[in-house]
Amino acid sequence: MFDIPQKMNATTHLNLDFLYEITNGNEAKLVNLIKSFIQEAPQTCEKLHSSMMNKKYDTIKAEVHSSKPLFMSVGAHSAIVIIERIENYSSSPLFYELLPIEIGNLDTLTSELCSTLKNKFNL
């Protein structure tokens, strides 16, 4: 088996307490949920980039809003802050120019989160 940390260092932007709770500490279930995050989170960022390039601001707002539970599941509160900014910025033409920056920030953080999870769980 692999060593599953009970709590991750705060610098990783993760808190897996929720996943430990809903899986009752079951390693197989926990790893499956983490694998889902690792697969889905980058796809979300790709969709956001594509929508940004096509100036589909309503799609950005809907996509980023629907991604909240995904990031909340791994306790990525830093990502939630970025997501909420993207949601707000995509609602107002005054802030459209800030969207590429925030989407880039989310993409960078998502890469960091996925890398950290892959390393911690030997995936």
Image (spheres, rainbow, N blue to C red):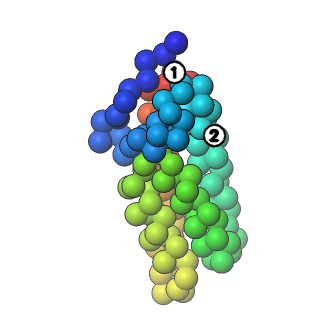
Residue 28 placement (x, y as % from top left): 59, 25
Q: Is residue 77 left or right of residue 38?
A: left
Residue 75 placement (x, y as % from top left): 42, 48
Q: Amino acid at mark 1?
A: Asn
Q: Does the image show residue 98?
A: yes
Indicate which disc residue 122 carries.
Answer: 1
Q: Please give the name of the residue rendered at 39% of the width and 55% of the height, measured from the top-left corner.
A: 77
Indicate which disc residue 15 carries.
Answer: none
Above or below, 91 relative to 81: below
Q: Nearer the viewer, residue 27 or 77?
A: 27
Name the residue that disc number 2 marks.
36
Above or below, 12 relative to 106: above
Which quadrant is home to the C terminus? top right
| Element carrying mark 2 | helix
Q: Earlier in the sequence, mark 2 or mark 1?
A: 2
Q: Nearer the viewer, residue 90 or 120?
A: 120
Q: Please give the name of the residue rendered at 62% of the width and 63% of the height, measured from the top-left corner.
A: 66
Q: Nearer the viewer, residue 60 or 72?
A: 72
Residue 116 placement (x, y as % from top left): 44, 34
Above or below, 37 relative to 60: above
Q: Does the image show residue 105?
A: no
Q: Please give the name of the residue rendered at 52% of the width and 66% of the height, measured from the top-left corner.
A: 100
Mark 2 and mark 1: span between their CA atoms?
15 Å
> Few, some or many C-alpha atoms within 10 Å of disc 2 (few <14, some 14-19, many ≥20)?
few
Residue 44 placement (x, y as % from top left): 63, 54
Q: Please give the name of the residue rendered at 45% of the width and 44% of the height, measured from the top-left corner.
A: 18
| Element carrying mark 1 | loop
